[in-house]
Amino acid sequence: MTAARQTAIGLTLAALIVAGWITLHVWGVFFQPLTGSNLAVAPLIILTQSWLGAGMFIVAHDAMHGSLAPGRPRLNAVVGQICVGAYAAFSYRKLNGSHHQHHRTPGQAADPDFHAARPEAFVPWFYRFFTRHFGWREFAIVTAVLVAYLLIGARVANLILFWALPAIISAAQLFFFGTWLPHRHDRTAEPFADHHNARTIPMPWIASLLTSFHFGLHHEHHLSPMTPWWRLPELRRRPDA
């Protein structure tokens, strides 16, 4: 596949994910009623928003590897910052440096995305991962946006249901399927195939998409970091993968 075609597909998918996330975010926070039959669609909005939130991270992740728009580092950085900034005021530069260190030392003590002291435990690992990247800077920005939302009419219940809850669910979802399961050290888990200390989570294509935008195909990702998320199933099917 040519770089131009990969860029066109990647940016189109990224635009759909970001536009979908923004649309549901604005609708849920400002316009979704929480009375009567409207409550029935709230879980669907929350789950869809959570899934799209995971997609925002995956788009930024592809940008970090340059696979979103091959050969265009500035464009990758701009799109990546839009995605992680809109999600929770994260710093793309900080996440980028941390992620590349992860690829240099996957599943080792020097891996910032790894909990060497508790390599089998989900909650301590997730807490450490989250607090490493969400600090006072991010907290201050999110708080300022929260206050602005309240001043222009957002309701507290809507903010909790359609902003805070999807953000927490998507972060936990992506970490569970895209980091903890693939990299955990556990005697009951499938052994690692090589020095990447990463395993692939076997599941049907649709489940792989819905859980983590195929990030569960993690061994394939470490073998070929320049392969974008939407081509990982194709890489999995190759006899030499």
Image (cartoon, rainbow, N blue to C red):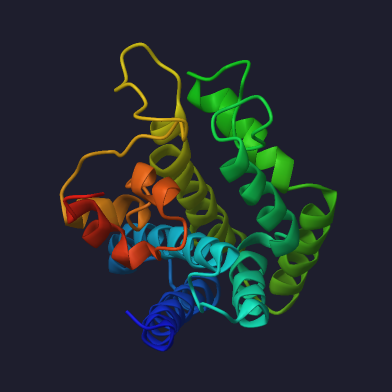
Is 176 situated above or below 50?
above
Residue 52: x %, y % from top left: 42, 65
Is 200 situated above or below 71?
above
Left or right of 131 in this view: 50: left
Q: Between 129 and 9, which is closer to the camera in this rendering?
A: 9
Left or right of 182 in this view: 167: right
Q: Residue furthest front?
A: 240
Left or right of 224 in this view: 97: right
Q: Between 219 and 10, which is closer to the camera in this rendering?
A: 219
Identified at 59% across, 24% down, the residue is 124
Q: Between 71 and 61, which is closer to the camera in this rendering?
A: 71
Q: Residue furthest top?
A: 187
Instruction: Report the label total.
Output: 0
Identified at 67% across, 68% down, the residue is 85
Q: Between 13 and 68, which is closer to the camera in this rendering?
A: 68
Quadrant position of residue 192:
top left
Split into 4 quadrants, where in the image is the N terminus?
A: bottom left
Residue 51: x %, y % from top left: 38, 59
Left or right of 237 in this view: 83: right
Identified at 51% across, 48% down, the residue is 171
Residue 221: x %, y % from top left: 40, 51
Identified at 69% across, 72% down, the residue is 149
